[in-house]
Amino acid sequence: MEKRPGRLLLLSDLSVRNTAYEVSLSRSLLTWKKRLPSPVYHPFKPSMCRSVTVSEIICVREEEEENSSRDEGSWRKIREGHGRDCRQAFTVSYVERGRNHRWRCAEVTFVCPDAVLCQRWVQCIREQLAALGCRPKHLLVYINPVGGKKRGKRIYEQKVAPLFARAGITTHVIVTEYANHARDHLRTDAELKQFDGVVCVGGDGMFSEIIHGLIWRTQMDSAVNPNSPEEALQACPLRIGIIPAGSTDCICFATVGANDPVTSALHIIVGDSQPMDVCSVHHNNTLLRYSVSLLGYGFFGDVLSDSERKRWMGPARYDFSGLKMFLTHHYYEGAVAYLPAKGIMGTPRDKTRCRTGCVVCEHNGKVFTEKGEKYKSAESFDAEGEEEWQSVRGKFLAINAASMSCACPRTPKGLSPAAHLADGTTDLIVVRKCSRFNFLRHLIRHTSKDDQFDLGFVEVHRVNRFRFLPRQCQSDSDLNLRDAHKRQIFGPLCRDHPACSCGPHYSSWNCDGEVLKHAAIDVRVHCQLIKLFARGIEETTVFEEVTNPCAI
Ligand SMILES: CCCCCCCCCCCCC/C=C/[C@@H](O)[C@H](COP(=O)(O)O)NC(=O)CCCCCCCCCCCCCCC
Ligand SMILES: Nc1ncnc2c1ncn2[C@@H]1O[C@H](COP(=O)(O)OP(=O)(O)O)[C@@H](O)[C@H]1O
Ligand SMILES: [Ca+2]
């Protein structure tokens, strides 16, 4: 990828590790090119020229001590002709890309011929950083001390807090004392106006707490009724950063490309922004929960319920319960009605992947923000959407809705590899009853290149809305699912069976790692309701990852 410098703000001969460099700064790029002792031209020698985009500079500082650079080792300050207080060197900290989408904080120290020039450089770089405008200055941090391997607090203190301090970010840190502490604090107590974002140190469950608090608060502030699936929700203004310290950490992995606290901290510091879809899950016109990753009934619901009793096992509980539920091989009966997404780019089985600057999300995002208005009234939704509802009924091993790929270390390509973070849709995956052997084939394909949907008993649809009704709750009047909305089939029936637990083989929904207490649900996708301090997974080119030569 060619990096164009634009008009130069500064151009000086400075030295790095006792070697002369031509250093330039434009509004977009900081570049340092080695001055060659001989005029021999080495166009492909990578160490000769490096550049970093200004938006990925973390900070700049003047060096204060005589042998100030810790990392540079050999260089010494050149102080001839200057008093002891003269600062002649400055260090730039910047983002360096490593393998597997990991970011590191790298440093380079430039020694200047005089203190005035040094100060000009520092001031000019600081001005460029201040002009960026998207960087957070003050953050509200919630730490779950008991998530994952119980390392949340240590991870934050050792790996994240020092980086925030270096970048000049101030924080208000709350270590949670009980489940839903963060959610309730965000709902009512937190003075949100003073913060530029919220940071979640924990797993998907902790992230879920944060979005529940923030979405609720935003709807209350805008007088939107969160219980009705027909209401268009108000987008949350604050961005959320995730420092992974949980068990699955799929939301972090699918939005950043890695589960690494330093990488996440750097995405927060540079002020990245990634919009994300949120599903609201309702029962009888009452909001149950929000979901951003997996809504799973059957297999994944059972794995979660079973694993909750084994929290003491840590992240391994999912593998244990996964194996157990695979062997149990329960199937469930019910009906799914869904509204296929119309006018969109992309299908759940295409080869496109949601990556940084995704055009599918941009296109579909526009489609659904314009359409969003129409969802406001139930009548208009009826009139336009009714005949579009489709249905599937029968016996299922699993019904999953993936609003994003759900990529995580267990399945690096994800539950639905072609799903998009911010396209206003969710991929509804229906796995019909099949043999253990076939189900295993389906599961194993999540970990290989083979298509997990290319099996006769699996179907997948990209949808805006769906409803599920377990068999125990159905009656003859429900058979025509095309009329589902008008007749409100879920309402009266499920009032008779509050927990819908009226049969032997009923499952529960896994909603981003939380068990839902109702099986009959009505789900609506809200396009780009929240924003994360992330940029989606970057396409990496070997060229960029390994050498970073500047192409100027
Ligand atoms: C045989 C290998 C099969 C691999 C199949 C992998 C599918 C994994 C899909 C993972 C989707 C993850 C979606 C995210 C869910 C999270 O919100 C949520 C909460 O996370 P938190 O605890 O960090 O707060 N996590 C979960 O619900 C965990 C789901 C994990 C399921 C693991 C299932 C393992 C299945 C193993 C089957 C073994 C069969 C072996 C037969 C010889
Ligand atoms: N201080 C706390 N004590 C007990 N539970 C908590 C606390 N803070 C948060 N929780 C809850 O812990 C659960 C798991 O959190 P999470 O960070 O997602 O870890 P994991 O990925 O291991 O499930 C969440 O449901 C969250 O509500
Ligand atoms: Ca989506």
Image (spheres, grey):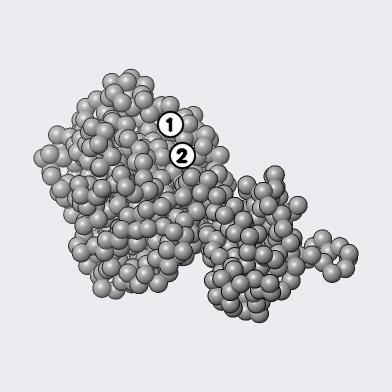
Q: Determine whether label 1 and label 2 are within 8 Å by CB.
A: yes
Amino acid at pointer 2: Asp
Whether residue 295 is situated above or below residue 107 in the rendered picture: above
User: Ligand 3 within 8 A of label 2's CB?
Assistant: yes
Residue 42 horizontal/vertical position (percent)? 83, 64
Q: Residues within 10 Å of mark 1 (few under 14, many from 20)?
A: many
User: Depth check: 464 or 182 in front?
Assistant: 182
Seen at 36% across and 45% down, the residue is: 238
Amino acid at pointer 1: Phe
Residue 199 horizontal/vertical position (percent)? 36, 56
User: Dot 2: what SS?
Assistant: loop
Seen at 34% across and 49% down, the residue is: 195
Q: Residues within 10 Å of mark 2 (few under 14, many from 20)?
A: many
Residue 96 horizontal side relative to residue 136, left or right? right
User: Dot 1: what SS?
Assistant: helix
Seen at 19% across and 38% down, the residue is: 286
Q: Is residue 401 visible?
A: no
Residue that label 2 marks: 423
Which of the marked residues, 1 or 2, is nearer the chain's N terminus?
Answer: 1
Which residue occupies the extreme right position in the image?
Answer: 39
Residue 185 is labelled as none
Residue that label 1 marks: 368
Residue 250 horizontal/vertical position (percent)? 41, 58
Seen at 37% across and 58% down, the residue is: 170
Q: Is residue 270 visible?
A: yes
Residue 541 horizontal side relative to residue 263, left or right? right
